């Protein structure tokens, strides 16, 4: 038999951008392969997974120089054209190579499989799917018995009607993104559930994004209760899977496969789930859309929220962004009419938002034996809750016992030898720990510098607050929830369950506990030390603080019956600050308006577009030298017209693990102008890296969140 002519096939492989291989590579195959198919190919001396990529092969190299595709993973339907397009867009927008991004967003285990292993996995998946649908993972029991489908509040009904109208009007075109602006406890989740029901009824899949892993169990439980096939859901079972980084590699692959094969109807996940392959996708929900966790902080620094909007547009499906404190980007787009703003103005049950009280620390009497966080009025308020059998939440965004240990004799402080930061005192395991590089030592019994026995903690973290509460309020059941208390699997779920079931009187925690949780018994939320963010050099710090405090306050009075006596306390040295004044009125709109006016006059996002170039070197000079050369090159580029390159400055924590870190901001009036500059600049940066030997790493962050 005559040999078939071999063909060129374009394959995306995981070659990092700096290798200079930015696009897919050509390989040879004896038969045509559908775009989106997974294949194994040689690259250098390695053999890797690749994805047959849509589009014409490069055709550059001689066929004789090309290598053959080794195998095709034939048990799976190919990734869809729109999935490939999403990846291609993200790679281009965030300046990464297609192959790097495409492979990085697949479940890690998938990349390792051969055909035999894949078949075994699919068989296992089949068994899993045959088992009765139940939430995957450890969804907590809902506290109250499921009430089935509640009657919608008039506001919820109106939102859903408007949503329907929007979809009707947008037949065959992409509906505008919906910004669901609803105060805390207004029933946004119920709106997501109904919108999901609608999509599921049409045979479509639904993707729900949440900012943090620890919010997935709660949401999963609510979706499972509604759609998981229990009596309350009316019997029709839908498969729900989650996708986040806390799953085992095997679970992640299984859930991904379930979505890809169209077997899972609902996918709940964190930012990485925005890349889930979902052939029947019909709705995307982004809960707490303002949350900074949607931005990936390394590798391809993508914003899952922004990609969700792109994906919805491309697939012509609705996307709902929900928040009580929308990001100023989204808020501005709604102001401009590009997003459709839908409003849930009141709490379910008609309860009020907690009364916000600002306590001026300058006028606070210092109570004996208690440092300033636990002021007399706060202790009284806590006692009152204890007497009434209600819960309180104290929010302090700093974990550990104290941020620094100090010797009053010689002024030694527990700095980290490797970072420009203090090591934090953790009393529980008697360590000094650097939260930047992880360097950990046992607490010295005397000052390492002068031998003084009397070294003392300065300041306070959650651990110390917990201890002080126990001292001041003996008998109160105090529980701390932060990254330290929840290191092990299952701890957070157990702790949250204890709060829900009323085994806790006072909850102390970092921002971990302020988000999303539907606590029913809290009537007092106190922020004891929030001022730091008011004076940050990051222009987004006030926006973040406002959102955090609104969200924290939103944990109080969620039960309408208790709403009237619910309070949010803010202990501050600056009660007159505009941010707190807006908070006092629960006035997000006034706050947004004033922030947007400031941003506009200062030429900051959303009125300008930013990229941040970061450089790391063993010395400041190495990092700076690279950035200076990069700036000089940019300034000479015709594409940089209308763009501004700022001088390089050290990052806020300049040295981490003995590496000096610098950053340089680039600003442009439009997205297009910024993208043009970056496109021409990137190849030069790769070349510059080779010239600057002292440079360890550089990275580009498009639309950076933390500056
Ligand atoms: N129509 C309704 N009838 C009765 N209860 C409802 C209704 N809609 C929502 N709820 C209940 O009200 C509570 C608050 O709703 P939900 O958690 O959806 O609010 P949210 O807006 O998402 O809050 P947050 O932004 O604070 O997380 C929940 O316990 C929910 O079950
Ligand atoms: Zn360190």
Image: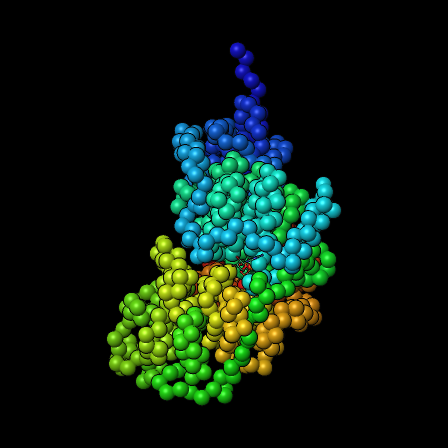
Residue occupying image coordinates x 51% and y 56%:
211
Percent across and percent down for residue 507 are 41, 68
* Side of 670 relative to 79 (left or right): right
Residue occupying image coordinates x 38% and y 67%:
504
The picture quadrant where one finds residue 86 is: top right
* Side of 346 relative to 247 (left or right): right
Q: Foreground residue, 177 or 89?
A: 177
The reply to whether residue 311 is in sight is no
Is residue 38 placed above or below 577 in the rendered structure?
above
Q: Foreground residue, 404 or 272?
A: 272
The reply to whether residue 187 is in sight is yes
Q: Foreground residue, 637 or 574?
A: 574
Q: Residue furthest top?
A: 1
Residue occupying image coordinates x 52% and y 45%:
233
* Side of 82 relative to 106 (left or right): right
The quarter of the picture where the C terminus appears is bottom right
Residue occupying image coordinates x 54% and y 78%:
357
Is residue 424 placed above or below 492 in the rendered structure?
below
Q: Foreground residue, 600 or 224?
A: 224
For the image, the number of numbered tags is 0
Percent across and percent down for residue 365 are 45, 88
Percent across and percent down for residue 520 are 47, 64
Color encoding of the figure: rainbow
């Amino acid at each position: 038999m005559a040999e078939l002519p071999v063909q060129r096939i374009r394959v995306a492989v995981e070659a990092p951008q700096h290798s200079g291989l930015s696009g897919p590579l050509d390989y040879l195959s004896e038969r045509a392969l559908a775009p989106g198919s997974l294949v194994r190919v040689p690259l250098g001396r390695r053999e890797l997974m690749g994805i047959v990529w849509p589009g014409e092969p490069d055709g550059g190299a001689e066929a004789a120089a090309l290598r053959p595709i080794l195998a095709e993973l034939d048990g799976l339907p190919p990734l869809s054209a729109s999935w490939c397009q999403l990846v291609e867009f993200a790679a281009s927008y965030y300046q990464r190579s297609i192959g790097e991004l495409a492979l990085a967003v697949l479940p890690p285990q998938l990349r390792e499989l051969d055909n035999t292993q894949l078949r075994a996995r699919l068989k296992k998946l089949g068994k899993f799917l045959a088992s009765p649908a139940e939430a995957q993972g450890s969804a907590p029991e809902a506290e109250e018995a499921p009430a089935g489908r509640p009657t919608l509040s008039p506001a919820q009904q109106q939102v859903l009607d408007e949503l329907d109208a929007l979809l009707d009007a947008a037949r065959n075109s992409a509906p505008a993104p919906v910004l669901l602006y609803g105060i805390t406890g207004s029933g946004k989740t119920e709106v997501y559930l109904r919108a999901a029901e609608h999509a599921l009824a049409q045979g479509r899949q639904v993707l729900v994004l949440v900012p943090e892993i620890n919010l997935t169990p709660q949401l999963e439980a609510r979706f499972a209760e509604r759609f998981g096939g229990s009596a309350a859901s009316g019997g029709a079972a839908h498969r729900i899977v989650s996708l986040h980084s806390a799953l085992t590699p095997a679970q992640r692959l299984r859930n991904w496969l379930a979505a890809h094969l169209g077997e899972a109807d609902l996918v709940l996940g964190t930012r990485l789930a925005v890349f889930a392959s979902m052939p029947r996708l019909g709705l995307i929900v982004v809960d707490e859309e303002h949350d900074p966790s949607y931005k990936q902080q390394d590798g391809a620094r993508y914003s899952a929220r922004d990609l969700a909007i792109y994906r919805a547009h491309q697939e012509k499906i609705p996307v709902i962004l929900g928040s009580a404190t929308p990001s100023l980007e989204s808020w501005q787009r709604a102001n401009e009419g590009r997003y459709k703003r839908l409003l849930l103005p009141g709490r379910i049950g008609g309860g009020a938002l907690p009364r916000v009280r600002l306590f001026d620390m300058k006028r606070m009497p210092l109570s004996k034996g208690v440092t300033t966080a636990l002021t007399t009025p706060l202790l009284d308020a806590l006692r009152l809750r204890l007497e009434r059998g209600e819960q309180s939440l104290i929010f302090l965004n700093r974990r550990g016992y104290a941020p620094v240990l100090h010797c009053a004799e010689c002024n030694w402080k527990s700095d980290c030898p490797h970072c420009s930061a203090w090591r934090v005192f953790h009393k529980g395991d008697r360590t000094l720990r650097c939260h930047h590089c992880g360097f950990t030592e046992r607490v010295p019994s005397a000052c390492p510098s002068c031998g003084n026995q009397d070294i003392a903690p300065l300041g306070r973290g959650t651990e110390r607050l917990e201890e002080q509460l126990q001292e001041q309020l003996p008998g109160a059941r105090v529980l701390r929830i932060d990254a330290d208390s929840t290191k092990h699997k299952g701890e957070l779920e157990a702790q949250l369950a204890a709060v829900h079931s009323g085994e806790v009187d006072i909850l102390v925690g970092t921002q971990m506990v302020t988000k999303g949780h539907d606590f029913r018994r809290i009537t007092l939320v106190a922020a004891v030390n929030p001022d730091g963010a008011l004076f940050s050099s990051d222009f987004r710090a006030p926006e973040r603080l406002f959102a955090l405090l609104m969200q924290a306050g939103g944990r109080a009075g969620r039960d309408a019956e208790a709403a009237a006596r619910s309070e949010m306390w803010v202990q501050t040295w600056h009660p007159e600050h505009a941010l707190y004044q807006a908070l006092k009125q629960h006035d997000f709109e006034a706050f947004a308006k004033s922030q947007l006016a400031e941003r506009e006059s200062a030429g900051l996002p959303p009125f300008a577009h930013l990229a941040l170039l970061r450089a790391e070197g063993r010395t400041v000079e190495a990092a700076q030298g690279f950035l200076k050369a990069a700036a000089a090159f940019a300034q000479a580029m015709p594409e940089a017209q209308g763009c501004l390159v700022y001088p390089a400055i050290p990052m806020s924590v300049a040295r981490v693990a003995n590496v000096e870190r610098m950053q340089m901001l680039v600003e442009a009036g439009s997205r297009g102008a910024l993208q043009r500059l970056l496109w021409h600049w990137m190849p030069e940066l790769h070349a510059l890296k080779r010239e600057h030997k002292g440079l360890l790493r550089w990275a580009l962050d498009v639309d950076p969140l933390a500056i």
